[in-house]
């Protein structure tokens, strides 16, 4: 009998799945791709994410606790599903690894310029593996502890009030930007992570309120993103935002506190907890998929050995230059955005066909 996730922990876990290091570059992405008053676009992206979660809710209700693997297997033979879920496991493993690698590369440039990033990355992945071996319940408990450590960060935005000027936003909307579909996707990728609730079906019951938890988490993420972007657009001009790599770090570098000399460094270092949980959640999704692909294996360590290949590939195959890592992260993020929409639609179609044929799940 599997333990079930409580509602409170699930909400925090969902919030950590969505938010991460992308927050520091989000105002630049908005200024480049959306333009003036680009923070409003976050409300549009949030609505799309909420609709996607609604699609997942239909799958959740019709499946009655069945896993996505059981649902898929009811419609397609396993020789088709094995390569499909194999690719999906690789996508989740690489995506989580790249999120961690991007954070490590930024941390290295800020605090450890003379240290090879491989040392920091290996230490980081050891933490991920330690969390993975404890299971999803321990991961959710760790997320709650990390939440209490990081939640106060939002209060630091109040120190930007003195230099905030509403006129910097101008009266124009969505001007001086590219407005390409690719640009909108780059912004929308910041909301990804909610699709992992598809793997949580067996770990929930009616008390978990899984879909409600993820919708509330999406609202929390939207509030955090929108408030941060709004303050940034009033703190810097549009031209400044478009030429800053990480505007949030630049903004907090102006903040001076009597007990902390560099609040921007402290803020970024604390973000380690969020990135750790995000990386671990994608890694957990990959491990769950690998375990389904190897049902006959009686060696519990085999899925972890297979999973270890992907962080090593992220470290050694993909170049360690930050720009290259961000490029690959964008490509895998684009693929994940497609999975977030297409996988629930596929599962929903399968469930509706089964229902039409009288094969309802008990």
Image (cartoon, grey):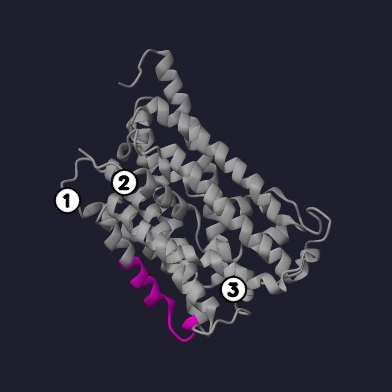
Q: Residue at x 68, y 58 (%)?
A: 30
Residue drawn at the location 47% of the way across and 35% of the way down: 56
| Picture quadrant where residue 67 is located | top left
Nearest to viewer (mark 3 / mark 2):
3
Residue at 37% x, 29% y: name it: 71
Say which residue label 3 marks: 249
Please name the residue shown 27% across and 62% down the image.
Answer: 130
Q: Quadrant where the C terminus lies?
A: top left
Distance of mark 2 from mark 1, alpha carbons? 14 Å
Of badges 2 and 1, the one in the foreground is 2
In this rendered view, identify the residue nearer to me: 296 or 26. 26
Q: Is residue 245 among the parts visible in the rendering?
A: no
The residue carrying pointer 1 sits among few (fewer than 14), some (14 to 19) or many (20 or more) residues within 10 Å by Cα, namely: few
- Point out residue 280 in the picture as x, y percentages from the top left corner: 37, 57
Dot 1 or dot 3: first in sequence order is: 3
Q: Which mark is residue 288?
A: 2
Q: Earlier in the sequence, mark 2 or mark 1?
A: 2
Q: Earlier in the sequence, mark 3 or mark 2?
A: 3
Kindly state the secondary structure of the residue where label 2 is placed. helix
Q: Secondary structure at mark 3?
A: helix
Who is closer to the viewer here, 264 or 167?
A: 167
Q: Is residue 219 magenta?
A: no
Position above or below: 223 against 63: below
How far is disc 3 from disc 2 in space, using C-alphas? 36 Å
For the residues bearing labels 2 and 1, Cβ distance under 8 angstroms: no
Q: Which residues are magenta?
A: 111-126
**As drawn, is 195 to the left or to the right of 311?**
right
Q: Which residue is mark 1?
A: 299
Closest to the observer, 89 or 170: 170
Q: Residues within 10 Å of mark 3 (few under 14, many from 20)?
A: some
């Amino acid at each position: 009998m599997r333990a079930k996730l409580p509602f409170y922990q699930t909400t925090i876990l969902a919030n950590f799945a969505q938010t991460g290091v992308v927050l520091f570059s989000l105002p630049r992405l908005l200024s480049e791709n959306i333009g003036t008053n680009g923070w409003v676009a976050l409300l549009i992206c949030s609505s799309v994410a909420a609709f996607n979660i609604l699609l997942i809710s239909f799958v959740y209700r019709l499946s009655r606790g069945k896993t996505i693997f059981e649902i898929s297997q009811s419609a397609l033979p396993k020789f088709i599903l094995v390569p499909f879920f194999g690719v999906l496991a690789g996508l989740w493993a690489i995506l989580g690894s790249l999120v961690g690698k991007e954070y490590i590369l930024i941390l290295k440039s800020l605090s450890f310029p003379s240290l090879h990033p491989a040392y920091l990355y290996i230490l980081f992945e050891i933490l991920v593996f330690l969390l993975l071996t404890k299971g999803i319940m321990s991961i959710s408990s760790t997320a709650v502890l990390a939440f209490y450590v990081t939640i106060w960060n939002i209060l630091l935005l109040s120190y930007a009030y003195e230099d905030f000027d509403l006129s910097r936003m101008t009266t124009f909307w969505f001007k001086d930007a590219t407005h390409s579909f690719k640009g909108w996707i780059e912004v929308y990728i910041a909301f990804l992570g909610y699709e992992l609730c598809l793997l949580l079906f067996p770990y929930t019951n009616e008390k978990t309120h899984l879909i409600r938890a993820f919708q509330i988490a999406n609202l929390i993420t939207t509030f955090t993103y929108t408030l941060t972007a709004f303050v940034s657009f009033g703190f810097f001009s549009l031209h400044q935002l478009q030429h800053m790599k990480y505007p949030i770090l630049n903004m907090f570098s102006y903040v001076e506190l009597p007990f902390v000399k560099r609040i921007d460094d402290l803020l970024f270092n604390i973000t380690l907890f969020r990135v750790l949980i995000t990386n671990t959640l994608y890694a957990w999704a990959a491990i769950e998929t690998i375990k389904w692909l190897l049902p006959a294996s009686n060696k519990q360590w085999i899925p972890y050995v297979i999973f270890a290949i992907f962080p090593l590939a992220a470290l050694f195959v993909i170049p360690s230059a930050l720009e290259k890592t961000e490029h690959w992260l964008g490509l895998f993020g684009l693929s994940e955005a497609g999975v977030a929409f297409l996988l629930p639609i596929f599962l929903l179609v399968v469930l509706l066909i089964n229902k039409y044929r009288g094969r309802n799940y008990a």
